[in-house]
Image (cartoon, grey):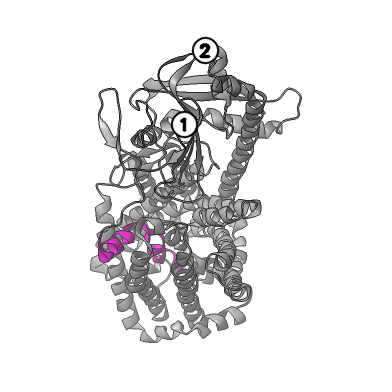
């Protein structure tokens, strides 16, 4: 049969009884209204940045003492407002969202987009990966600082309860991570309305505060912020580390673009989130100018006393939703890294058939839980956590700016002058925040940095080991390629049934097929050699998933590609191939999978021993290929062999 390619929506058998299920899902369908999507985005995209008023201005006040001068208060407010405008509105909502990888955003998607345009851009890939790894570092702090800052509102209501804040935060965080396996499909529909209520509430509280000192609105003039930076000396420079906390969630706006699209996110930000944040920060500054005590959380001082308890409850729920968004984002980014080949296969559980983003990654969940609880107990309060927060994500933002420079030039077609001018201005802002945050290293900022470097090191080591293993597979395939000639000549007897060899080699005769022929000396009447790769785009276009060539009578080699946001499903793929007219029974397929054991080379000429050891450990503990490719376990034959690296 001639070579063919195609992609059709069909169904395939799930078990021996013949239960039918849907094939690999395509891009999530966004058929809701613009308003509905914007409401849903409030519960997923804006949780982190939306709860930042709980601790940002409080941190700024902690850096300046209990009774800051009016010029300091107005300067800090001006810096916060214009940081929201420059970093979030212009850089992320405006510029970054105009550069997408087939609709997907985030630093990994941007890295893949630029890397695929020039295959030799190893530096771009490594820099982008480092930025993604840093997100894990601050991602462990976000749930801790958010929940703690919300519960610390009880100190305003009843100071005697402050001893219960830390235990309560630990219990809430434990419960949050424990229920991840259940998914959020059932309760997720409430996230958007709850966060909408949160933004309306903090906006109204801000208006209440502004009414007590309306002159605070002069701080909307950026001159107040610039003057404070120029005249405040080192104290003003260090204050930037506290100001930066208002935009730590900005990267999430870009990363979650694929779930909702740019228009709903831009709409929600422009008409609700941004105004509510500005009003609330202005309200906090106003009551500071009015002489309200600042020895505890100034956010809760905005609220009339009869409404404090409901506000603490609402703030706690909002921070739980914000933490959920961080956890879900970590799951999604991990899946992208696995698909792109930078992390080993991990067990990924689809918690709901309704949404592709509804996943649960057990290993990431429990590791993130340990890190978050350790930070919560170790630092003990939101003030101490704020001293360590922001340093990692500020590095990620600088890296995003560097990637956007290339994207503006190559994707948007801007001249180097225009792209360089825009990126240069953004880089100055990013460098200012990064430099200020570096002062936090000795105060605990080394913790998220260490976590980020650990994740980055694992990514680089795994990729180095995987590349060495692939080179060895190719070498073995070349040495044994003469067997293919015998196969083509029909020297091997054929037996009934269909065999699918899951190869990880781009040669016609992969090692797993050679082993089968050498030891069994026979072949099924229909054979597929499947070389599965992940494309550097989120979703492979219809008609491009599989390219098939017949290399011998009824022996087909299929080059398969899935996008890095797709779920590889080999049985569904074979049903798709069958629908194209290939004569075999997709319900009667035996899958052959290599089970490789990594060992060190005895001659010492392979990988450094510590790299080989770490890669071997990651490989041993990776999820089975059968689970990753959704292959029925009762139809799998595993062939073990050693790879000496």
Task: Please name the residue that numbered disc 2 is placed on.
Answer: 520
In terms of sequence position, does the residue under pointer 2 or pointer 1 come before the other? 2
The percent position of residue 540, horizontal first and vertical second, equals 44, 48
Could you say which quadrant of the image residue 444 lies in? bottom right
Q: CA distance from mark 2 to mark 1?
A: 28 Å
The percent position of residue 181, horizontal first and vertical second, equals 34, 39
* Residue 33 on the magenta segment: yes
The percent position of residue 293, horizontal first and vertical second, equals 40, 72
Asked if residue 308 shows in the view, the reply is no
Q: Badges 2 and 1: C-beta atoms under 8 Å apart?
A: no
Q: Is residue 594 left or right of residue 472?
A: left
Q: Which residues, given as a range, are shown in magenta?
A: 32-56
* Residue 536 on the magenta segment: no
Number of marks: 2
Of the 4 image quadrants, the one containing the C terminus is top right
Task: Please name the residue that numbered disc 1 is placed on.
Answer: 623
As displayed, is residue 143 above or below residue 516? below
């Amino acid at each position: 049969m001639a070579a063919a390619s195609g992609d059709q929506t069909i169904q395939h058998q799930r078990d021996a009884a013949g239960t039918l299920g849907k094939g690999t899902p395509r891009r999530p369908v966004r058929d809701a209204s613009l308003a509905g999507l914007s409401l849903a985005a409030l519960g997923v995209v804006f949780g982190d940045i939306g709860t930042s008023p709980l601790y940002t201005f409080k941190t700024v006040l902690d850096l300046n003492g209990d009774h800051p001068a009016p010029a300091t208060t107005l300067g800090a407010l001006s810096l916060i407002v214009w940081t929201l405008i420059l970093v979030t509105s212009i850089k992320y909502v405006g510029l970054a969202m105009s550069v997408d990888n087939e609709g997907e955003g985030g630093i990994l998607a941007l890295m893949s987009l630029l890397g695929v345009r020039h295959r030799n851009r190893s530096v771009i890939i490594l820099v982008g990966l480092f930025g993604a790894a840093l997100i894990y570092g601050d991602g462990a702090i976000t749930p801790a600082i958010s929940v703690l800052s919300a519960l610390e509102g009880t100190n305003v209501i009843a100071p005697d309860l402050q001893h219960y804040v830390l235990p309560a935060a630990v219990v809430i965080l434990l419960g949050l991570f424990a229920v991840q396996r259940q998914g959020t499909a059932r309760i997720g529909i409430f996230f958007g309305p709850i966060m909408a209520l949160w933004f309306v509430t903090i906006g109204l509280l801000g208006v209440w505060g502004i009414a007590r000192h309306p002159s605070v609105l002069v701080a909307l003039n950026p001159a107040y912020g610039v003057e404070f930076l120029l005249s405040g000396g080192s104290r003003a420079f260090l204050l930037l580390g506290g100001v930066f906390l208002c935009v730590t969630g900005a990267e999430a706006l870009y990363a979650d673009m694929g779930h909702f699209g740019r228009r709903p996110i831009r709409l929600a930000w422009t008409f609700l989130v941004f105004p509510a944040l500005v009003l609330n920060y202005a309200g906090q500054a106003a009551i500071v100018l009015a002489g309200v005590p600042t020895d505890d959380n100034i956010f809760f001082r905005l609220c009339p006393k009869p409404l404090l308890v409901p506000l603490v409850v609402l703030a706690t729920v909002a921070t739980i939703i914000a933490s959920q968004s961080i956890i879900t984002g970590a799951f999604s980014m991990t899946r992208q890294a696995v698909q792109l080949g930078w992390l080993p296969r991990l067990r990924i559980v689809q918690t709901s058939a309704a949404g592709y983003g509804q996943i649960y990654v057990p290993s990431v969940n429990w590791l993130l839980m340990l890190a978050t609880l350790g930070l919560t107990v170790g630092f003990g309060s939101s003030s101490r956590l704020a001293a360590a927060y922001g340093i990692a994500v500020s590095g990620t933002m600088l890296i995003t700016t560097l990637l956007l420079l290339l994207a503006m030039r190559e994707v948007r077609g801007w001249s180097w002058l225009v792209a360089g001018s825009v990126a240069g201005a953004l880089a100055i802002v990013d460098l200012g925040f990064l430099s200020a945050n570096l002062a936090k290293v000795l105060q605990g900022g080394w913790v998220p940095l260490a976590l980020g470097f650990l994740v980055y090191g694992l990514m680089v080591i795994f990729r180095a080991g995987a590349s060495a293993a692939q080179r060895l597979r190719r070498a073995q395939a070349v040495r044994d390629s003469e067997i293919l000639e015998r196969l083509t000549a029909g020297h091997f007897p054929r037996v009934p049934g269909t065999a699918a060899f899951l190869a990880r080699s781009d040669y016609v005769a992969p090692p797993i097929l050679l082993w089968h022929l050498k030891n069994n000396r026979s072949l099924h009447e229909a054979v597929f050699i499947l070389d599965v790769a992940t494309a550097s785009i989120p979703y492979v276009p219809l008609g491009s998933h599989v390219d098939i060539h017949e290399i011998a009578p009824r022996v087909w080699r299929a080059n398969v590609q899935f996008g890095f946001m797709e779920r590889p499903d080999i049985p569904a793929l074979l049903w798709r191939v069958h629908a194209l007219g290939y004569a075999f029974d997709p319900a009667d397929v035996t899958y052959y999978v290599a089970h490789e054991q990594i060992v060190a080379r005895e001659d010492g000429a392979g990988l450094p021993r510590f790299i080989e050891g770490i890669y071997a450990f990651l490989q041993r503990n990776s999820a089975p290929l059968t689970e990753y490719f959704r292959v029925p376990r009762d139809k799998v034959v595993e062939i073990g062999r050693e790879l000496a690296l």
